[in-house]
Image (cartoon, grey):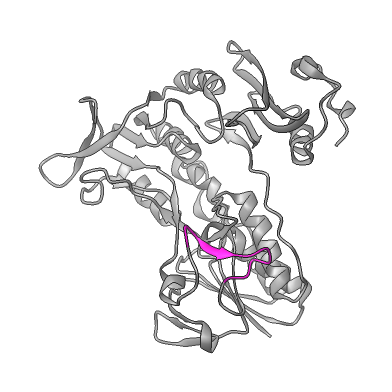
Amino acid sequence: MRFVIIGNGAAGITAAAQIAQAAPGSEIDVYSNEKYPYYPRPRLPELLAGTIEVGDLYFHDNAWYEKRGIQVHLNQSVTALHPDRHRMALGDGRHVLYDRLLLAAGAHSFLPPIANAAQLQGVFTMRDIGDVLAIRAYADGKSKAVVIGGGLLGLEAARALLQLGLSVTVVEFFPYLLPRQLDAGGAAVFTDYVNELGLHVITGAVSESIVDSGAGVARGVALKDGRMLDADLVLVSAGVRSNLDLPRAAGIATNRGVVVDEHMQTSAPDVFAAGDAAEFNGIVWGIVPAALAQGRAAGLNMAGEATIYEDITPSNTLKVAGIDLTSVGTVNPEGEGYEQLRWTNRDNGIYKKFVIQNNRLVGAILLGDARSVGAVTRLVNAQADMSMFGTDILADDFDWSLVQA
């Protein structure tokens, strides 16, 4: 049987590994329009900062692919899908037949309707290695940067630019940084830390246009409130959108992503989707944990091992601009019936929040203190019963092993 995967990111390569394990001896071909083998995108800011080089990003060596019989075709674009014929067309004019196909082509950076953003030299988005190398080259000799977007990637990119010697201003539309991972209280603690790094932060601000130097080169950002921010380089980090041109042209059902069922199956026979390209139950997660989980489920189902994908509890555990942050489950609940327990130590950069619904732990934020991350994440995933503990869980020495998952 021949399995074909479009996309060599987290979902695609995870699916390939699962197929190799579940259906040994199969043909597994991965096609990517990038010229680099699989690498974790969350590490791109390290490449931008110059603390690592391109080769350091590669997740697997050649022997790993050879051992599993996975053939990766780099710098190879797919131009059309023909699900009725189990065939796809490549950019060089060739056609490839498949028995089962996975759409894992990920997403592209979203460029908001900011005047001149798409026209001027010196305006960038950051999604892949090529983007990073272009930014790094352009940043040489520059002194000021503006990063539009105060989410995870925007802040990590801002810190990397700071490490390159630029002064950096971060502009965030929402009232506080990391609006998907933090609440206002946690963001206040986090912003203190970011300011100490040397980043300048402006929140609750709308970027209206990129200002032209007069020579087609960016020289700043104009905010809707009239403020003007000088910049030699502008990086827009405003989220991503699923890559949908191929499936839409092929008549495969799409919405915000390629619509899949609990088996990661699309509306086309023998065509599956996973990762940033896929939409399950109306959600495109756009985060690595979802890509890994969906890639595993898709690979197993493609190989004939019926597997039900159960949606993840959204979770991020990482260092953001150098500070430990875990955000898991429901951290900004809407509606009634939630209890929110908080503890703040701004002097030490620590913030803890636990969200409880019907005595069950449904969400948590742990900022600046990683000691209980594993236990808390597991208990949120299990929606553990917290009725016996009350505010005791806020204590610095609380024993999380007392809580039963």
Q: Is residue 83 above or below residue 310?
A: below
> Could you say which quadrant of the image residue 337 lies in?
top right
Q: Position of residue 250 (x, y in %)?
A: 45, 77
Q: Is residue 64 visible?
A: no
Q: Position of residue 224 (x, y in %)?
A: 24, 30
- Which residue does the image show at 64% across and 66% down from the upper left? 264
Q: Which residues are magenta?
A: 255-266
Q: Main secondary structure of the magenta part?
A: loop
With 33 as the anchor, is 115 left or right in this view?
left
Comparing 95 with 58, the one in front is 95
- The residue nearer to you, when weighing 265 against 25, is 265
In the depicted view, which residue is nearer to us: 304 or 385?
385
In the rendering, at what x and y percent does residue 121 appear?
22, 48
The residue that appears at 22% across and 24% down in the rendered structure is 227
Front one among 65 and 183: 183
Tell me the quarter of the image containing the N terminus: bottom right
Q: Quadrant of the C terminus?
A: top right
Q: Residue furthest front?
A: 336
Up/down of 301 relative to 119, above or below: below
Residue appearing at x 35%, y 51% in the figure: 134
User: Compared to 162, does 127 lie above or below?
Assistant: below
User: Is 166 one of the magenta-colored residues?
Assistant: no
Viewer can see residue 278:
yes
265 is within the stretch colored magenta: yes
Q: Position of residue 3 (x, y in %)?
A: 63, 79
- Left-right relation of 63 to 392: left
